[in-house]
Amino acid sequence: MASFTEQLANFFGTRDTDTSLRELFISELKGMYYAEKQIADALPNMAEAATTDVVRDGFQMHLAETENQIRRIEQIFQQLGIDADEKNCNAIDGLIDDGDLVIADTESGSLTRDAGLIIAGQKVEHHEIAAYGSLHSLARLLGYHDAAQLLSESLEEEKNTDRKLTEIAESFINERAKMESDNDDDTDRDGIRDRMRDTVRDGDYGQTTGTYPGGSSYSGVTGSGTEENADAVAWRNDQATQENRTWNTDNDTRSNSGNTTYRRDTDPLTGGPGGF
């Protein structure tokens, strides 16, 4: 059975189309270069606006991942023998504007804001998944195998980030955001917090513990911005080691240069050094 790449080649006909496809590939690559730079500019604002540590830290670490994706695109430009250049992408501009509106329209310090930021983040991720997937297919068709590998790495990172955002939202963010919205009367905030409190403590909302769908655990003071995956805390405290890790994205196992091996089902909520 013909591979997907071969089917594409048959669909487009002869290799005479390579020139126009190369132009299309370069044009889309320029658009992605622009998009990643805009995302890198927007992520610090999203992190600063987040309520919980798990969302804030995830955006901050995804920024480092995005900067690495920018370098990959620059490497592809170099492989093609052309200067790195940008092309405006109206889609990403609109998605980033949507994220700004979420911040403007939600209350600071609320779980509703985090729920909205996760939605905004996933909209961006879905755009990137579509763009990287298309670029990867064209790179394979055109015989740009090194470029295809680089694009595949970025594609898998975006898919993983999207999965982690879903996991965060469904673990406790959305549920507690609903509890906030059950009573819109600001005079009864204390009552809302009492209902949200799992164990009464001196914290803003109370201590919360639980397990994410992936199997990892979280704990912290809900609503005060201290919800943490215990594994994420341990990983983040090892800043020196994280810079030396090389993460494989073509399967479920991620290993560093030493003896530590991480699997996605036990990753920190932030997904290891690669982001969420």
Image (cartoon, rainbow, N blue to C red):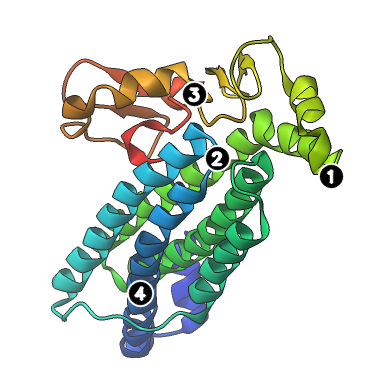
Amino acid carrying mark 3 in the image: Glu
Residue 172 drawn above or below residue 123: above
Amino acid carrying mark 2 in the image: Thr
Residue 276 at least partly seen: no
Residue tagged by mark 1?
A: 184
Residue tagged by mark 3?
A: 228
Q: CA distance from mark 2 to mark 1?
A: 18 Å
Residue 22 drawn above or below residue 152: below
Residue 184 falls in image quadrant: top right
Residue tagged by mark 4?
A: 34
Residue at the image point whose x is 66% and y is 54% from the top: 106
Q: CA distance from mark 2 to mark 4?
A: 28 Å
Kindly indicate whether the residue at mark 4 contacts the one at mark 3 (C-beta within 8 angstroms).
Answer: no
Q: Secondary structure at mark 3?
A: strand
Which of the two marks, 2 or 3, is nearer to us in this view? Answer: 2
Sequence-first tag of 2 and 3 = 2
Question: Which label belongs to residue 51?
Answer: 2
Residue 42 at least partly seen: yes
